[in-house]
Image: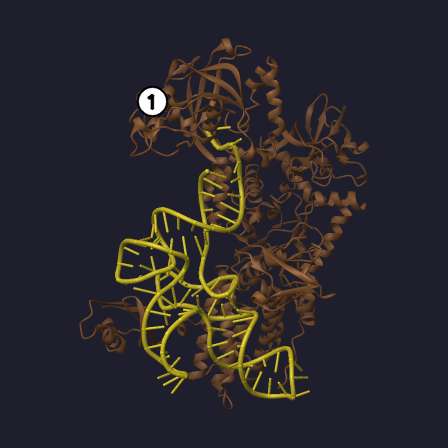
RNA sequence: GGCCGCGUGGUGGAACGGUAGACACAGCAGACUUAAAAUCUGCUUCUGGGAAACCGGAGUGCCGGUUCGAGUCCGGCCGCGGCCACCA
């Protein structure tokens, strides 16, 4: 029999067309079966898909196809995170309108995704730049505003003085604007904020219940929210020393046990008291200005020296009216956290110690480490932040840190200063409110109007959506909305007086914070169709990159809560299952002139030490560099289109799932792809060979099976059990291995055929082939359809139910137990599956290896673990 | 600086506390070919003995512990990676 090669290119297009025409991946919201929502993070339409997308969407598709076969009503949609800066950059560089650029990219990428054979419900496709999407976002913004979940307040922005524009943090490189190269300034501007901090406690607590999230992501979110319990202490100030007679300074601390080790107070350069003092002290004003110049660039913070300025103000120790502490302004105190002021305890905080040493403020140790003699315990340049007993602390002496904290809190809560308690217990969060204002064109307009007379006026419902004007130009820097003649200037909806529209647009993270809910009914005229959203949410399995572990996932958790508070859905956690997949990485290649070379232009030969690379074009040698994330800058990318054109989508999908565990990085290699491609061909040959032998579909089941038939049946049912579990647990690399294992066994079984096979064997081959195709269908759906048809089926395997497992076939009547002597394997025994322990023991003691080891003496102990192992202790 | 994760053959990686190295890649040998490709078969952790079948020893970064039994659990090192970070 001659079997022609499987022509992936031709077959894949053909099956995609069939799936499309029959609409088998469309999800009905009124389907009575249990729902299953699987979602991959939607892409930004950059122009072309990359291998990371291929990996991500393949994993999601495997889950979707598997769950569909398991009889669930699967929702598996796709859309576009379509707003964002690259569209504006393209507009500036290439004179394309951001909208045109974005929609061209969407069309191109959609075609690419279609060529992957993903089982998506394209009818639900959404693009966040479509007014039909963002109008609902605007409605919810106004709902949030009414509910007090949106605020306008001053915030710092990165201001590029040359381009006259606000820059995102990632556009600031080494303190300079990425385009102009100008030194970036910090400017205070009124901005819109989402009140995410109102949910700090809940967002933190609920993490404990997200047990199908990676622990790593939960830890990252926990740290980001950054809850700390402490004490808010009001220090009295010596009014004779303060600029305007200010008489107290509030400080947040988590180490109130160390109050008797205090040596100084320090204020943030932005602290109101520092600003007030600076007004009367030019030297201080100059110091503060200097701090602000250096203040922001993250890289500088590591190396920046601790600097301070003694304001001359004096604070009074809360436990000793006669104890005065100098008040400094210091460059390492941030206004954002706590109260923007601290008390410094040099002995037990490294930063405070560095500062005190520099300014000669000394230190007094107040916590003595266990086992240390208090009389000899001194701190020089390493602060001690561990546990211990209190010393040099009057009434706290001898207490543990915890006891001291409690005692200090108790006393200060009951002490009073100016008719208020000196201290209150406080919980502080690192989490800040979410600033969503972006001074950009290509984003969702913020639907408010600024009226000189009425202030901030929401755009009336009837005038929504506020759509972006198309007639804009990008010739000049800055936000085109801000200089638009007609769009910007409008009549106030309230008083009809002159007013102007808000020209800021929303952070694109807002768009991606609720798209998964919109997918449940993208046609509804309200933001959500409540009954449908309540039924189809939450997302059962969300899959995407670890880079979104904090922002996107936290914002989405916030947004869902805000939507619940405003009646749009009855849900708090949007994603019950989360999986973060690893990146696709590749070797890098560098030509002699130092330029990076794309892998497609490189030929690699040899192995190990002898591995050499050269340019295909002219044979010029190329240096093989380290394996890195595929990136445009290193040019170590492989184009999915090229791979799909030469090997087919199934090969690319199979390789993406092979070898590496899905949460880890996968190394893309030419050899690996070819291995996957060879397996595609091998499966095709195997199924065609099996089809020759297999009994016709629906043949009556034989009453008895001979040895080879039974062995084949056991193997295929074992594979079925394993693969089902592997997919359920998203262990795709193990799943792939189990399919290889069975394919090898099946192939060997067919090769062992000596004569004309008997009917029972033919029946077993039919079963094995059908199950094999069903098992690899989620990973290689086109090949599976082709094989399914070759096996004589008239149905689509994509619509078939998952094969039924016969658990009896997993149970062997005799089993082989490994035998250990003192924990080392020395042999094995074959016994009946349900053999009694004594029976096993005597069989084991009869083994030569055991006799030799025991040397005639009785064993000290024989441990028999039923159906697992035997260990003889000699 | 804080928190977290990971160290297994030439490589990617398997392994409910129970036969370490499944499966794949690469490599080597052979079969089929005039030849190559493709395909098929076998070998491939290190090491000692043996012509071979086979028989032994060591082995999951290092040191110790718990256990009949540890890649897996506990403690301490070493190395690599990630995230956060003048956060009081």
Q: Which chain is brown?
A: A
- Mark 1 crowd level (few <14, some 14–19, many ≥20, 10 Å Cα): some
Q: Nearer the viewer, residue A698 or A56?
A: A56
Could one spot residue A553 in this view of the protein?
yes
Q: Is residue A744 above or below residue A40?
A: below
Residue A409 position in % (x across, y down): 37, 24
Answer above or below: position of A789 versus A98.
below
Q: Residue at x 66, y 27 (%)?
A: A189
List x then y, in percent, for residue A346.
43, 26
Chain letter of the residue carrying label 1: A
Q: Residue at x 38, y 20 (%)?
A: A412
Kindly indicate the quadrant of the structure image that contains residue A707. bottom left
Q: How is the image coloured?
A: by chain
How many labels were placed on the picture?
1
State whether residue A867 appears in this view.
no
Q: What colour is chain B?
A: yellow
Residue A854 as seen in the image, left or right of residue A627:
left
The N terminus of chain A - image quarter = bottom right
Estimate the x, y position of residue A76 in percent, counting from the top left. 60, 56
Task: Measuring from the top left, give residue A307's x and y in whole percent.
Answer: 54, 25
């Amino acid at each position: 029999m001659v079997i022609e090669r499987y022509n992936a290119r031709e077959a894949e297009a053909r099956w995609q067309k069939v799936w499309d025409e029959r609409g088998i991946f469309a999800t009905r919201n009124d389907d009575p079966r249990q729902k299953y929502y699987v979602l991959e993070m939607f892409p930004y339409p950059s122009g072309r898909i990359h291998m990371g997308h291929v990996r991500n969407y393949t994993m999601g598709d495997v889950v979707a196809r598997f769950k569909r076969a398991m009889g669930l009503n699967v929702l598996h949609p796709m859309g576009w995170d379509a707003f964002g800066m690259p569209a504006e950059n393209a507009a500036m560089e290439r004179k394309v309108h951001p909208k045109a650029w974005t929609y061209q990219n969407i069309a191109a990428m959609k075609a690419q995704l279609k060529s992957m054979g993903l089982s998506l419900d394209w009818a639900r496709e959404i693009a966040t730049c479509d007014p039909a999407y963002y109008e609902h976002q605007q409605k919810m913004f106004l709902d949030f505003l009414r509910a007090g979940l949106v605020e306008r307040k001053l915030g710092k922005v990165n201001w590029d003085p040359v381009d006259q524009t606000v820059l995102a943090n990632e556009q600031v490189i080494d303190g300079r604007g990425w385009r102009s190269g100008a030194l970036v300034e910090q400017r205070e501007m009124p901005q819109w904020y989402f009140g995410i901090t109102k949910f700090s406690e809940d967002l933190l607590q609920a993490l404990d219940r997200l047990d199908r999230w990676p622990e790593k992501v939960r830890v990252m979110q926990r740290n980001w929210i950054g809850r700390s319990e402490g004490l808010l202490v009001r220090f009295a100030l010596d009014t004779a020393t303060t600029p305007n007679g200010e008489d107290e300074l509030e400080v947040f601390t988590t180490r109130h046990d160390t109050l008797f080790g205090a040596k100084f107070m320090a204020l943030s350069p932005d602290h109101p008291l520092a600003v007030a003092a600076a007004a009367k002290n030019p030297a201080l004003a100059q110091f503060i200005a200097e701090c602000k110049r250096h203040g922001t660039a993250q890289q500088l913070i590591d190396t920046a020296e601790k600097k301070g300025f003694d304001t001359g103000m004096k604070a009074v120790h809360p436990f000793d009216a006669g104890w005065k502490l100098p008040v400094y302004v210091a460059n390492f105190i941030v206004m954002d956290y706590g109260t923007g002021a601290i008390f410094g305890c040099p002995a037990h905080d490294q930063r405070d110690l560095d500062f005190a040493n520099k300014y000669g403020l000394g230190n007094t140790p107040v916590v003595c480490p266990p086992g240390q003699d208090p009389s000899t315990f001194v701190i020089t340049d390493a602060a001690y932040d561990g546990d211990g007993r209190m010393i040099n602390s009057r009434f706290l002496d001898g207490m543990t840190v915890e006891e001291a904290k409690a005692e200090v809190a108790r006393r200060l809560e009951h002490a009073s200063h100016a008719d208020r308690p000196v201290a209150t217990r406080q919980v502080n969060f690192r989490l800040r409110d979410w600033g969503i204002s972006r001074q950009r064109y290509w984003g969702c307009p913020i639907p408010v109007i600024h009226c000189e007379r009425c202030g901030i006026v929401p755009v009336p419902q009837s005038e929504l959506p506020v759509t972006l004007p198309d007639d804009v130009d990008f010739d000049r820097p800055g936000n085109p909305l801000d200089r638009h003649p007609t769009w910007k200037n409008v009549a106030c909806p309230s008083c009809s007086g002159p007013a102007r529209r808000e020209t800021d647009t929303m952070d694109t993270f807002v768009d991606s914070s609720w798209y998964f809910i919109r997918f449940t009914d993208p046609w509804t005229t309200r933001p959500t169709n409540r009954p449908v959203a309540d039924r189809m949410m939450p997302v059962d399995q969300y899959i995407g990159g670890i880079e979104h572990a904090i922002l996107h996932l936290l914002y989405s958790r916030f947004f869902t809560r805000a939507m619940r508070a405003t009646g749009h859905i009855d849900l708090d956690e949007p994603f019950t299952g989360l999986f973060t997949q690893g990146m696709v990485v590749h070797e890098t290649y560098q030509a002699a002139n130092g330029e990076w070379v794309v892998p497609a232009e490189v030929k690699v030969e040899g192995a190990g030490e002898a591995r050499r690379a050269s340019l295909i074009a002219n044979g010029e040698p190329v240096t093989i560099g380290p394996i890195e994330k595929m990136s445009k800058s290193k040019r170590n990318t492989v184009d999915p289109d090229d791979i799909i054109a030469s090997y087919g989508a199934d090969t690319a999908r199979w390789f993406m799932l092979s070898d590496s565990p899905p949460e880890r990085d996968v190394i893309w290699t030419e050899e690996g792809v070819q291995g996957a491609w060879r397996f595609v061909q091998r499966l095709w040959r195997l199924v065609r060979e099996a089809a020759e032998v297999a009994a016709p579909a629906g043949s009556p089941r034989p009453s008895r099976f001979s040895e080879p038939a039974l062995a084949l049946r056991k193997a295929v049912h074992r594979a079925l059990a394993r693969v089902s579990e592997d997919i359920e647990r998203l262990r795709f690399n193990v799943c792939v291995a189990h399919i290889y294992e069975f394919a090898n066994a099946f192939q060997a079984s067919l090769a062992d055929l000596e004569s004309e096979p008997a009917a029972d064997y033919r029946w077993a081959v039919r079963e094995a082939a059908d199950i094999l195709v069903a098992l690899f269908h989620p990973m290689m759906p086109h090949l599976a359809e082709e094989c399914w048809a070759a096996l004589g089926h008239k149905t689509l395997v994509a619509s078939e139910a998952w094969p039924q497992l016969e658990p009896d076939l997993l149970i062997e009547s005799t089993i082989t137990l490994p035998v250990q002597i003192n924990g080392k394997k020395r042999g094995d025994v074959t016994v009946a599956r349900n053999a009694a322990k004594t029976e096993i023991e005597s069989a084991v003691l009869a083994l030569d290896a055991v006799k030799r080891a025991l040397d005639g003496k009785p064993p000290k102990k024989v441990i028999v673990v039923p159906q697992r192992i035997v260990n003889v202790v000699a």
